[in-house]
Image (cartoon, rainbow, N blue to C red):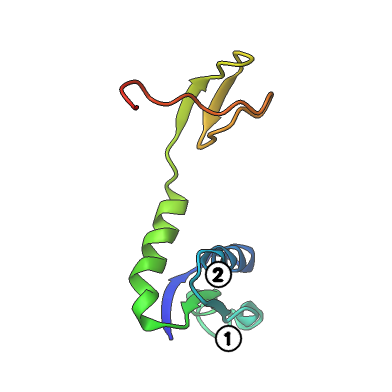
Amino acid sequence: MKRVRQAPNLALATLWADQLGAAGIAASVQRAFASGIAGELPPDQCLPEVWVAEDAQLGTARRLLDEWQHLPHRHWACPGCREIVDGPFEVCWNCGTAMPAPPGTP
């Protein structure tokens, strides 16, 4: 087992481990309940951590987490309803129309 990353809270650690699992990487959360001993130990030593079961998947797991944390920010007008859509979304929140392909894309 190898540590992928320390998380700022249990909710994010669980989300990250679940996302990795959905991507086919066996992951678990360690130190899930260590926050109760913060003060007895340094607080940064009590944060939850995400670990992968297979050492060979460490690089892939770190790359995926980085990609998920740095999703592209887009700003586009929906061709269906003309609603302005911001963020990493690829579908209009208002009518469900897919984002148009960038110019020059076949």
Kindly report the distance in space between the C-alpha atoms of the residues bearing marks 2 and 1.
33 Å
Query: Residue 97, image x and y in percent?
Result: 61, 25
Check the image and report above or below for 8 versus 56.
above
Residue beneath the point at 55% across and 74% down: 48
Q: Which residue is mark 2?
A: 21
Foreground pick, 105 / 42: 105
| Local secondary structure at mark 1 | loop
Instruction: Tell me which numbered mark, 2 or 1, is placed earlier along the sequence.
Output: 2
Mark 1 surroundings within 10 Å by alpha-carbon count, few (fewer than 14), some (14 through 19), many (20 or more): few
- Asked whether, in this view, residue 81 is left or right of residue 69, the answer is right
| Figure disc tally | 2
Q: Quadrant of the N terminus?
A: bottom left
Residue beneath the point at 42% across and 26% down: 101
Q: Which residue is mark 1?
A: 40
Task: Name, please, the residue furthest toward the front.
Answer: 106
Residue beneath the point at 34% across and 79% down: 56
Q: Quadrant of the C terminus?
A: top left
Mark 2 surroundings within 10 Å by alpha-carbon count, few (fewer than 14), some (14 through 19), many (20 or more): some
Q: Amino acid at mark 2?
A: Gly
| Local secondary structure at mark 2 | helix
Check the image and report above or below for 20 versus 53.
above
Q: Amino acid at mark 1?
A: Glu
Check the image and report above or below for 67 versus 51.
above
